[in-house]
Amino acid sequence: MNRKIKSFTILLLGLLVASMFFSALTQGAVLSDQLIVTEGSYVRGKFLYTNTTHNDVLMAYITLSVDDIWNDSYSLLNMVNFKVLYEFQADGENPLGADDLTTMEMTAVVFEHNRTTFLPAASLVMSNDTWEMSADVLYLGKTDAMMDFNKANITVDGVSYIWEDMDGSEDYYMDYFGMVFSMALMNAFLLVYNSYTPYAINPHGNVADTVSFEPSNGVVDEFEPITTSGGDAYDCVNVEYINTATFGFDDVGEVDVHYEQKSGLLIRSLEKDTSGDTQMEFQPIEVVIKSAGFLPFPIVGVIVSFVAIGLVVVISRKRK
């Protein structure tokens, strides 16, 4: 074979393989579950309640943040920590059932490669004007250890114990028991709705793509901008879910979520209880999306493609 033709053939094959390998995986019916959120990104907004007699009652300010992305030494997989802070504001009865709280903070640990939730509340902090309590297994640093709630670090008003070390004689023992029980209950409850995280998706998809979720999958409905109360507009992927929840603590008939189109981070949600004619809406006030710190995906693909082509050419020449 002519040397130029052979080189051209190798180049063409290399480009073909590279284009197949680096083509968007979301062109099919199912959206990729690979998360691409960046550490430090966050959205802060209002959580509003509406029913037949009340309109847009402010229940809470919510901040959703990508708190950490880390490698788990047990599974050897990357994990994403999503932190959700509720700052409760509503007077009187709170539709979230959090009448005794002024703040609640949960940190969910999620597998980066497939969006599945390892623990929806690996850390749980609750407080009001007179007390603060927390339960935490996140400090253990790897997933196999976090599964043992006996190792939970429980803190009540600044005094901490490891749960398995307590014998019942400690001051305020029942508060410690209540806190570790609350963390266990919160994890069991939220895993019903959050086996796939609602906080982020892979945004590289198309209208009508399926989004993995529980108890039923979501569907990409459209692409449209969402504007914060400060007037900043963000292109978003709109996903429709049914019979589930995002920031609320009960499943509802229809859930409409907007994810920022570059990062896939949730920046708006609308939870409608169609049977009870009520809804809860998360409206963004401030959105911050951190840079990934590396070249965008298509350019990385091109660079790696040419590296692969170069290696093929070098090996081919050595075999002459």
Image: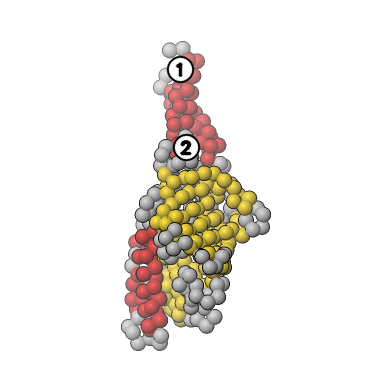
Decide if residue 131 is on the left or right side of residue 186.
right
The residue under label 1 is which amino acid type?
Answer: Lys
Which residue is at a point 44% across and 24% down the rendered structure image?
13
Determine which of the numbered discs, if any, sits on residue 6 in the image: 1
- 227 above or below 312? below
Image marks 2 and 1: residues in contact by CB distance under 8 Å: no
- Residue ID for mark 2: 24
Which residue is at a point 48% across and 40% down the rendered structure image?
206
Q: Place residue 193 in its image quadrant.
A: bottom left
Is residue 228 or residue 293 the one in the foreground?
228
Q: Place residue 6 in its image quadrant.
A: top left
Q: Position of residue 159 (x, y in %)?
A: 46, 81
Is residue 180 or residue 44 the one in the foreground?
44
The alpha-carbon separation of the residues under discs 2 and 1 comes to: 29 Å
Whether residue 6 is visible: yes
Determine crowd level at label 2: few under 14, some 14-19, many 20+ residues with C-alpha closer than 10 A. some
Q: Earlier in the sequence, mark 2 or mark 1?
A: 1
- 32 above or below 75? above
Determine which of the numbered discs, if any, sits on residue 212 in the image: none
Q: Position of residue 221 (x, y in %)?
A: 48, 45
Of all residues, the one furthest to the right in this rendering is 231
Label 1 residue SS = helix
Quadrant containing the C terminus is: top left
The residue under label 2 is which amino acid type?
Answer: Ala
Of all residues, the one furthest to the front in this rendering is 52
Q: Position of residue 158 (x, y in %)?
A: 49, 80
Label 2 residue SS = loop
